[in-house]
Amino acid sequence: MTIAPGADVLSAAGGHARPEPEAEAVEVAVAVHAVNQAREVARVLDAAAAGLESRWAGRAAVLAADGGSQDATAEVLRRWCESAPAPVRRRVIDAGAPASRGRAVLALLDAAQSLGARAVALVDADLTGFRAEWVGALVGPVLRGEAEYVSPAYDRAISEGTLTVNLLAPLTGALYGARLQQVMGGCAGLAGRLPGEWIAAAAHAADWQPHGAELWLTTAALAGRVRLAEVALGRKIATAAAPTPDLATTLARTVGPLFALMEPYQAAWQESTDAPPVQRSGPGPAVLADGAAGASVEQMVRAFDIGLKDLLPVWEQIMAEPTLARLYPLALSPDEFRFPPALWARVVADFAVAHHERRLPREHLLRSLTPLYLGRVAGFIREARGASPAGVAAIVESIDRAFEAEKDYLVARWR
């Protein structure tokens, strides 16, 4: 990357960023990684700088790295860091080649540690609704010595975040013993010393799916049993850098890394029972009116039925016979379709074991989860629509408990 005079740059060596010799330590760093966000990234960077200037002027830095953009994102980052001097230092981080989001995350964390930052807010530029006050919310618990890892929680409608609610969060919580609303929330706060303990063992994260590195950070924090905090940030507004992939691809890119992480962290989740409590303060995230009334439960149920007919030979290689036997009756009453959390948790456990044992090509296996996931979402939306906020919370609680109840089964089958 060519940097014009005046730009403050850290370059990557061997995949890790190294500071200029004269670099001075900072107290707080906001590290922003961006892919194809030329239109939005400057606004995210401005919010990060504003959040730092209000409380840590002269003791903070905004670090920015491109994760392999095909648009003008890298140039926008360069120009922003070359703009008029401000009380917050601005640095472009060269993540090295081949460029990827994972490499950008690792380089940013290494750079923040090299600058001596006590606390780091890691931000995905896809989180275009990022606000200045979120900086203090993410790093405050770290600076006060209350937490070493801070995860966001968001207000959301019933039909939003259904993959997180029904699979990513409950499986992660069941494995590692602590419930977090988000495992890939677009931002996080962490103690500056932590990445140094994790990066060397996770260099392969650079080659993961687009958001695999973010999932790795959450998993490393949970497996490492560090002190956790969760902060409610309000409404999440995100703008994808590219057209949204189809559902099967989304499942492969998110559930795949979650399953894959179960292998290097096997000792942690098989031995773990209770993690340190998650610190929460203030009002929790709200359940919002569901604006997606058009989300067709009927179409989801139909997709489940088609999958049961067309993918049964595949599912027979993945799921145990008792699991399959519990699926057959679901297709008999489409008007009263239900997919109980306990059955869904068993399905996911069987898929995790089959993924571990490589019974099928992993991409093929993950894509075959799609009709089952749609069936579960149909059951979830049908149950949650019309429920009070307390009722929705109880439904989510039932999902978490179902996955926790399946952990012994998962441990027993894992070889």
Image (cartoon, grey):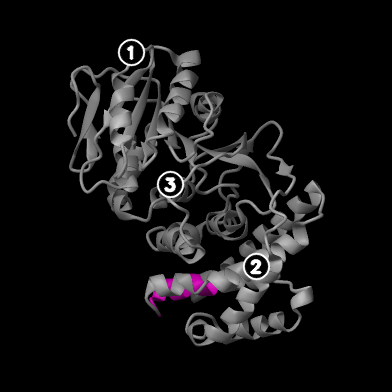
In this picture, residue 54 sits left or right of residue 102? right
In this rendering, which labeled residue sits more in front, label 1 or label 2?
1
Say which mark, if any, is on residue 214: 3
Classify the position of the N terminus by image quarter.
top left
- Which quadrant holds residue 61? top left
* First-in-chain label (3 vs 2): 3
Location of residue 78 with respect to 195 vertically, above or below: above
Q: Is mark 1 on a helix, strand or loop?
A: loop
Q: Which amino acid does label 2 sit on?
A: Arg
Say which mark, if any, is on residue 376: 2
Residue density around tag 1, few if under 14, some if 14–19, many if 20 or more, within 10 Å: few
Instruction: From the image, give the main secondary structure of the stretch colored magenta.
Output: helix
**Mark 1 and mark 2 residues within 8 Å of each other at the beta carbon:** no
Residue density around tag 3, few if under 14, some if 14–19, many if 20 or more, within 10 Å: many
Residue drawn at point x = 57 percent, y = 44 percent? 276
Say which mark, if any, is on residue 44: none
Say which mark, if any, is on residue 84: 1
Residue drawn at point x = 68 percent, y = 64 percent? 296
Provide residue 263's location: percent of width, then percent of height: 39, 63
Location of residue 305 with respect to 380 vertically, above or below: below
Classify the position of the C terminus by image quarter.
bottom left
Which span of residues is magenta-colored?
349-359
Provide residue 401's location: percent of width, then percent of height: 68, 60
Residue 72 counted in the magenta span: no
Location of residue 228 with respect to 203 vertically, above or below: above
Residue 356 counted in the magenta span: yes
Relative depth, front residue between 224 and 284: 284
Residue drawn at point x = 35 percent, y = 41 percent? 105
